[in-house]
Amino acid sequence: MPKIIYLTPDGTRHEVEVENGYSVMEGAINNNIDGIVAECGGACACATCHSYIDDSWKDKLAAMDDMEDSMLDAAFERKANSRLTCQIEVSDALDGLIVHVAENDY
C-alpha cells in the first residue's frame, strides 16, 4: 500500500498506509489525522479537507477540475499548491506523497 505523509499544522508528522482507490481525505479520516474535517464526506462541497501539496508533488497529481477549483475559492488561505484531499485518489504512483494539512477548523 502507498504511504502518505500528512504534516499537521502543529508540526506532527503522520506516515500512514492508504489503500489504492481511496482518497487522500479518506486516508486521513481512517487514520485519525487532525485537521482534515471533511464535513461533506468527500463530495467536493465544503473545502474542509483543504491541504497544501508539497511542491515536490504538485506536478505529479492529476489536474484539478473546475468544481474543485471553484470550491477552493471558499478555502481559508488558498495557495498555488492548495488541493481538496477528497479529490486526490491514492495509487502506487503517490507512494510518499507529502500533504501539509491546512487550518480547516475556522
Image (cartoon, rainbow, N blue to C red):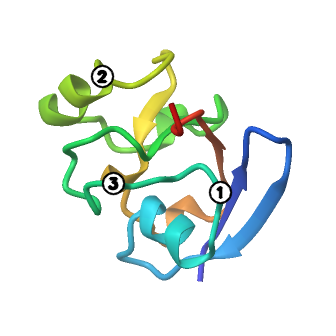
Neighbor class of circle 3 (other Cα within 10 Å; few <14, some 14-19, many 20+) is few
Q: Residue 43, position in %: x, y?
A: 19, 55
Q: Please say if 71 is above or below 89.
A: above
Q: Residue 69, position in %: x, y?
A: 24, 26
| Residue 74: numbered disc | 2
Q: Residue 23, position in %: x, y?
A: 39, 65
Residue, disc 1: 34
Q: Please say if 82 is above or below 3.
A: above
52 sits to left or right of 22 = right
Secondary structure found at label 2: loop
89 sits to left or right of 60 = left
Q: Residue 13, position in %: x, y?
A: 83, 55
User: What's the amino acid at mark 3?
Assistant: Glu
Measure the C-alpha gap from mark 1 to mark 2: 20 Å
Quadrant where the N terminus lies?
bottom right
Measure the C-alpha gap from mark 1 to mark 3: 13 Å
Neighbor class of circle 2 (other Cα within 10 Å; few <14, some 14-19, many 20+) is some
7 sits to left or right of 2 = right
Measure the C-alpha gap from mark 3 to mark 2: 14 Å
When asked about the image quadrant of residue 74, the answer is: top left
User: What's the amino acid at mark 1?
Assistant: Asp
Q: Earlier in the sequence, mark 3 or mark 2?
A: 3
Q: Which of marks 1 and 2 is nearer the N terminus?
A: 1
Secondary structure found at label 1: loop
Neighbor class of circle 1 (other Cα within 10 Å; few <14, some 14-19, many 20+) is some
Residue at image coords 27%, 35% = 64
| Residue 39: numbered disc | 3
Q: How many labels does the image show?
A: 3
Tag 3 near tag 2, CB within 8 Å: no
- In this view, the residue farthest toward the left is 66
